[in-house]
Amino acid sequence: MDRLQPFFIKYLQLNTDLGRKKDILADSFRKVLIRDGIPRFTPDRSYSSGNFSKLREKHAALQLDSSNGTSDRRDTILNRTGWPASSFKGKLILECGCGAGPDTETLLDLGADVVAVDIAGVDIASRNLSGNPRASHVQFVQDSIADLRLRPKSFDIVFCHRVLQHTPDPEKVLNHILQFVKPGGGVFVHSYSDSKFQTRRWKYWLLPLTNKLPPEWLYRLIELYAWPAFYLTNLLDKFKFGQRLNRIFIPFLNYRPAKKFASKSDRFIVEYGIHDTFDALSPKYDKPISPVRMKEIAAHNLISNFEIYTDPGMTLLRTK
């Protein structure tokens, strides 16, 4: 596919801020800005290169429900949004930060049209979903979600999951992306919690060191200790005090106790643990937004009724 999806073209904001890009984009969809059907407003490398890009290279399809044989992403999205599956059907969704495309896949399978944006690395998501029966209903865009070249108030739903805290300025990004939802439209935004329960985990006292290591070194280090950490955390998880030790001190995310992965092999659990542990220890930015600021920014931008949901691990903004 070397052209933009027809449904998407009218949502591009061709304004004078684009300079020469305006003429190229307006006159031909095959020159300069479009490569493999993806508009490239940002360079192929970004602040996410080395951490999130490495995960896409090493585990391109690991988190896709169609690849891992679970309904993890679908269940998570429906649970966290609090919306029925039918509410996505026929909706135009702006997905802010698509990664390798696991949420994109779910949104497509729920019947939505999706504009899936990421600052770099979108080719992997595009390849992952090229065989999806509804592949013609997604347009991938390489751009910063802090500066989107899209028409304001154009989308039925603005969706941002597991991304906001990894941007340089989460408050600025939240304020920006909310301008793209239609009046009365839906919004779902997820952030890690800024609670003490969350910030006292092992990742926050290791992150200032680990995110300065060469990514290949860090990844290899996690690979080396993954299996011993898997067995140790399994043992400690049998005791309440051991569960606390795992959460605070042992840098490995072990999903063996998770019911959603009960049928999966130990090898799969360890691979998933390597993926998510690297994901926790490598980002350049990890700045959870406070519920108070999230509420203030939402109130400034939205006319729809919304709620701020908090628990020890996450903060959610979602329209009712």
Image (spheres, rainbow, N blue to C red):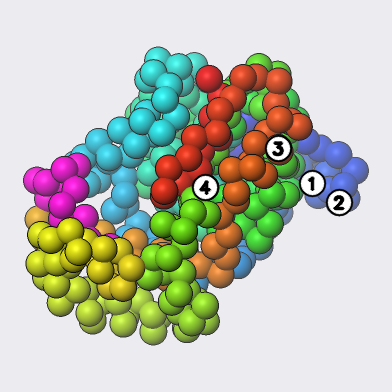
C-alpha distance separating marks 4 and 2? 36 Å
Mark 3 or 2: the one toward you = 3
Query: Is disc 3 in contact with disc 2, using a CB cutoff of under 8 Å?
Result: no
Q: Which residues are magenta?
A: 253-264
Residue 283 painted magenta: no
Q: Name the N-terminal-most of marks 3 and 2.
A: 2
Name the residue type under label 3.
Answer: Glu
SS of the residue under disc 2: helix
Q: Is residue 289 visible?
A: yes
- Point out which mark residue 255 bears: none
Prevalent SS, magenta region: loop
Query: Is disc 2 in contact with disc 1, using a CB cutoff of under 8 Å?
Result: yes
Dot 2 alpha-carbon crowd within 10 angstroms: few under 14, some 14 to 19, many 20 or more: few
In the image, residue 187 lies at what x, y percent?
A: 58, 29
C-alpha distance separating marks 3 and 1? 39 Å
Which residue in the protein does label 1 denote?
24
Dot 4 alpha-carbon crowd within 10 angstroms: few under 14, some 14 to 19, many 20 or more: many
Which residue in the protein does label 3 denote?
296
Give the answer, above or below, for where 212 lies relative to 69. Answer: below
Q: Please tell me in which quadrant of the rendered image residue 305 appears.
A: top right
- Point out which mark residue 20 bears: 2
Give the answer, above or below, for where 83 lies relative to 271. Answer: above
SS of the residue under disc 3: helix
Q: Name the N-terminal-most of marks 1 and 4.
A: 1
Which residue is found at the position 23% from the left and 81% from the top? 224
